[in-house]
Amino acid sequence: VQEDQQVLGYLLSTLSKEVLVAVTAITTACELWVALAGMFSSQSLSRVKNIRTALINAQKGNQSVASYFASLRGLADELAAAGKPIQDAELISYILH
């Protein structure tokens, strides 16, 4: 219980005021973690969808090949950071498309 309260205190101290207001009644670190995951998962799913749409709609246009590749690689890295990495073969298919 003591360790849980220490973790809870640490987590609460790192939250912004806007988020803290929404979780003030939570009493354990586990409950807080679940609540935070629920609060931010819909934003993450929306962001993943937006990134995938950007990959699908990407066009080289006037960019150099290196710049175009870098921009698509950046989108793939954003997907990985959101917990939804894509395989290199899938990235290559986006590039060739």
Image (cartoon, rainbow, N blue to C red):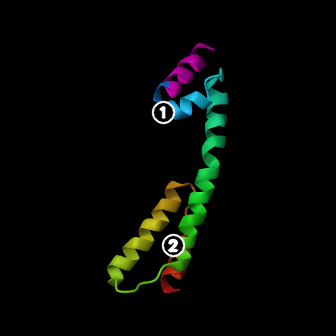
Location of residue 35 in the rendering, given as x and y in whole percent from the top left corner:
65, 35
Q: Which residues are magenta?
A: 1-12
Q: As displayed, is residue 65 above or below residue 42?
A: below
The answer to whether mark 1 and mark 2 are in CB contact below 8 A is no
Residue at 46%, 83% (x, y): give it.
Answer: 59
The amino acid on which the numbered mark 1 sits, given as a three-letter code, is Ser
Count of numbered circles in the view: 2
Location of residue 80 in the rendering, given as x and y in whole percent from the top left corner:
51, 59
Residue at 40%, 72% (x, y): give it.
Answer: 71
The amino acid on which the numbered mark 2 sits, given as a three-letter code, is Asp
| SS label for mark 1 | loop
Residue situated in front as seen by the camera: 10 or 90: 10
Q: Given this view, does label 1 or label 2 mark the residue nearer the observer?
A: 1
Q: As displayed, is residue 69 above or below residue 78?
A: below
Q: Which residue is mark 2?
A: 88
Residue situated in front as seen by the camera: 64 or 61: 61
Q: Which residue is mark 1?
A: 16
Seen in the image, is 66 located left or right of residue 90? left
Q: Residue 40 appears in which quarter of the rendering?
A: top right
Is 5 covered by the magenta stretch? yes
Location of residue 95 in the rendering, given as x and y in whole percent from the top left corner:
48, 81
Residue at 52%, 26% (x, y): give it.
Answer: 12
Is 23 covered by the magenta stretch? no
